[in-house]
Image: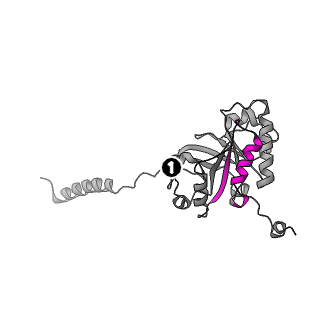
Amino acid sequence: MKSPCIKRLAFTILWSAFFGGMFAASPAKTPPVQYNGLEVSAENGNVNWTSVAKDPQIEVVYIRATNGKELDPMFKKNLAKVKKTSLKVGFVLHMNTNSSVKSQYDVFVANVSPEDCDVFPIVLVDENKNWGKKFAENLSWMISYLTDRYGGAIIYTTEAFYNKQCNTELNNSLPLLLAKPGKKEPVIKNAPAGTSYLLWLFDKKGTVKGLQTAVNLIRFHEGKGMSWLLIPKKKETEESGE
């Protein structure tokens, strides 16, 4: 017959095993996805910008303004609502081959005021379009027009298309937003030492509070940040013409 001491010892071991398992430390949670901004368009439908503005990771949002000579159907609504928040905002000009560079530029500037822009505008180049031999010239013109108007511009396309069509001495000096969903960072081929992207669109199926659809998530290259995007504010003496 077992002694009371042995019984108590056995009970203690069983109690510790059962309840210890219940209160054991939970496995470490997977770190949240790290992103610095979003790109939205009519494809994202109605956006609750108040909720988006509460996301501590979001430093900048880019809103699609035009597609060729057409306004993005949600542009005006997005612009009106985002201006009521503290978010830093920029706008996307989707450049295509259906109309001239100048006509696409004219539609963009007629709807996007420099006063509404916190950061440089982006020129989205569709990799599926047949640009032909005049591609580099057309892109250079657009960048030049936007730089004169807004102080600078960013080229936005896929890593593959950039390396095939855009990788020139001129464009290597410009800030880039390269789209390459996944874990591997974009690589610029045959570029001068130190050349790298500014922004990386790493996820086209991101989830953020305030959006009911998947959204494009972007992050800065390591060592780069908002100071690379912000449009320098003119001094009062320059604005008054003194």
Q: Nearer the viewer, residue 158 or 151?
A: 151
Residue 21 horizontal/vertical position (percent):
32, 53
Colour style of the rendered protein structure = one colour
Q: Residue at x 68, y 59 (%)?
A: 116
Q: Residue at x 81, y 52 (%)?
A: 148
Q: Nearer the viewer, residue 24 or 124?
A: 124
Q: Residue at x 79, y 48 (%)?
A: 145
Q: Is residue 13 visible?
A: yes
**In screen coordinates, is 236 left or right of 47?**
right
Q: Residue at x 58, y 55 (%)?
A: 78
Counting other residues with Cα less than 10 Å from the Cα at mark 1, is it few (<14), some (14-19), or many (20 or more)? some
**In screen coordinates, is 132 left or right of 75?**
right
**What element does badge 1 sit on?**
loop
Residue 233 horizontal/vertical position (percent):
76, 63
Residue 188 horizontal/vertical position (percent):
72, 38
* Stretch of the chain drawn in magenta: 88-115
- In the depicted structure, whether residue 16 falls above or below residue 174: below
Q: Looking at this rendering, what residue extends furthest in the right direction?
A: 242
Under mark 1, the amino acid is Thr
Q: Is residue 221 visible?
A: no
Identify the residue position indicated by label 1 in the image. Answer: 207
State yes or no: residue 76 in magenta: no
Residue 220 horizontal/vertical position (percent):
66, 50
Q: Quadrant of the C terminus?
A: bottom right
Quadrant of res 163:
top right
Quadrant of res 135:
top right
